């Protein structure tokens, strides 16, 4: 902590990664859940700038947290924390952020299987992004050489990805299940679906904290986690909160230094885009066993992988969720979001 305040920062520059934490801040969830000082002022500070350049978090996240005195890092890739812990970093997974791979990979009508992508153009949001990582795994399973067999085309996300597939700019894109249904009716083909891949979820991105803050101020960390869980509910409680999230995203995009982030709308095109966001309603990250087994099979674990129990510290998020569930005034909101989670399977 610096100056007595819990310091919270995003790992990634993407505006979407600020929406839950800024919702929790603006709606007063952090403050109401006890993240305040004895004199009644907020006991936290949210840093808006990404801590490391995109794609380099595996190398730099711990050092960036040290230099900027960050206690809690948002939207960290799970594999980053395992790698950092293997090297002795004081970093632990305390909660889920995105706990599911939810995209369907859809190919143009002439692409019948992943093998047909040899020599073709594959759309991704950005290099080293969740989408890029996910399709690399599947392409390797299909026997393709990632360096020679496909051409990567970045910038393929809403609203440009569907027109790009239809026009032939790319031969394959990741998209939401309801967009996939439309494309399939038009003659396209679903190449990879999430339904049977990750029954326990896939913890693509998580929230990490230093061991120091967990030891010295677990009370503040639990208050933070309560606020985040409530924000996850809030962000997925649609259409009730749609207009607020849409306006928040606009404000955050206008303030972004990145020209693409200022221009492209990713998350709030429609209420369904937000209710289907894979923010875990209990705050937990799950599915580490399957994720590590898959990465080991593909030769991605080139270090001594520490046990999951030595990397995860999710006791506080379990306590936070339990305490929220005991509050009658939150029951109605929770039931609405629980129905949404049941609908989408996460």
Image (cartoon, rainbow, N blue to C red):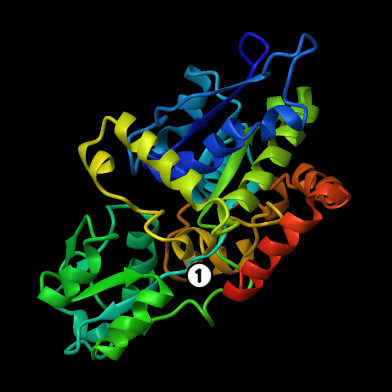
**Corner quadrant of residue 287:** bottom right
Q: Secondary structure at mark 1?
A: helix
- The picture places residue 95, in percent across and down from the top left corner, at 65, 47
Residue under the point 73% across and 44% down: 313
- Quarter of the rendering occupied by the C terminus: bottom right
Residue under the point 80% across and 12% down: 38
Relative side of 327 to 149, left or right: right
**Corner quadrant of residue 37:** top right
Relative side of 162 to 43, left or right: left
- Residue at image mark 1: 294
Above or below for 15 versus 197: above
Above or below for 26 versus 19: above
Instruction: Looking at the picture, tell me which residue is in the foreground, 36 or 112.
Output: 36
- The picture places residue 163, in percent across and down from the top left corner, at 18, 70
Q: Is residue 221 visible?
A: yes
Above or below for 45 versus 73: above
Relative side of 54 to 211, left or right: left
- The picture places residue 291, in percent across and down from the top left corner, at 55, 65
- The picture places residue 142, in percent across and down from the top left corner, at 32, 82
Residue under the point 59% across and 69% down: 290
- Quarter of the rendering occupied by the N terminus: top right
Q: Is residue 94 visible?
A: no
Residue under the point 75% across and 27% down: 220
């Amino acid at each position: 902590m610096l100056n007595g305040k819990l310091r919270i920062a995003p790992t990634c520059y993407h505006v979407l990664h600020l929406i839950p934490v800024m919702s929790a801040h603006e709606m007063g969830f952090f403050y109401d859940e006890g993240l305040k000082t004895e004199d009644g002022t907020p006991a936290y500070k949210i840093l808006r700038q990404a801590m490391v350049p995109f794609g380099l978090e595996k190398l730099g996240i711990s050092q960036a947290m040290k230099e900027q005195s960050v206690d809690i890092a948002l939207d960290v890739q799970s594999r980053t924390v395992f790698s950092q812990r293997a090297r002795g970093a004081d970093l632990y997974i305390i909660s889920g952020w995105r706990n599911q791979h939810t995209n369907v990979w859809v190919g143009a009508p002439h692409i019948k299987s992943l093998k047909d992508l040899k020599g073709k153009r594959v759309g991704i949001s950005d290099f080293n992004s969740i989408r890029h990582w996910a399709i690399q795994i599947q392409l390797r399973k299909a026997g393709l050489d990632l360096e020679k067999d496909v051409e990567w085309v970045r910038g393929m996300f809403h609203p440009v990805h569907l027109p790009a597939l239809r026009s032939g700019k790319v031969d394959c894109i990741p998209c939401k299940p309801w967009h996939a249904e439309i494309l399939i009716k038009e003659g396209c083909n679903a190449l990879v679906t999430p339904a049977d891949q990750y029954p326990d979820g896939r913890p693509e991105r998580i929230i990490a904290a230093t061991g120091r803050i967990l030891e010295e101020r677990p009370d503040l960390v639990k208050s933070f986690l309560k606020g985040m869980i409530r924000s996850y509910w809030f962000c997925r409680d649609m259409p009730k909160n749609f207009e607020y999230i849409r306006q928040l995203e606009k404000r955050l995009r206008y303030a972004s230094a990145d020209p693409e982030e200022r221009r492209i709308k990713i998350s709030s095109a429609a209420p369904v885009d937000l209710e289907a966001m894979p923010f875990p309603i209990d705050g937990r990250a799950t599915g580490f066993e399957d994720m590590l087994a898959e990465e080991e099979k593909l030769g991605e674990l080139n270090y001594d992988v520490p046990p999951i129990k030595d990397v995860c510290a999710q006791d506080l998020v379990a306590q936070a969720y339990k305490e929220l569930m005991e509050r009658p005034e939150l029951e109605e909101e929770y039931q609405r979001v629980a129905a949404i989670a049941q609908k989408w399977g996460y």
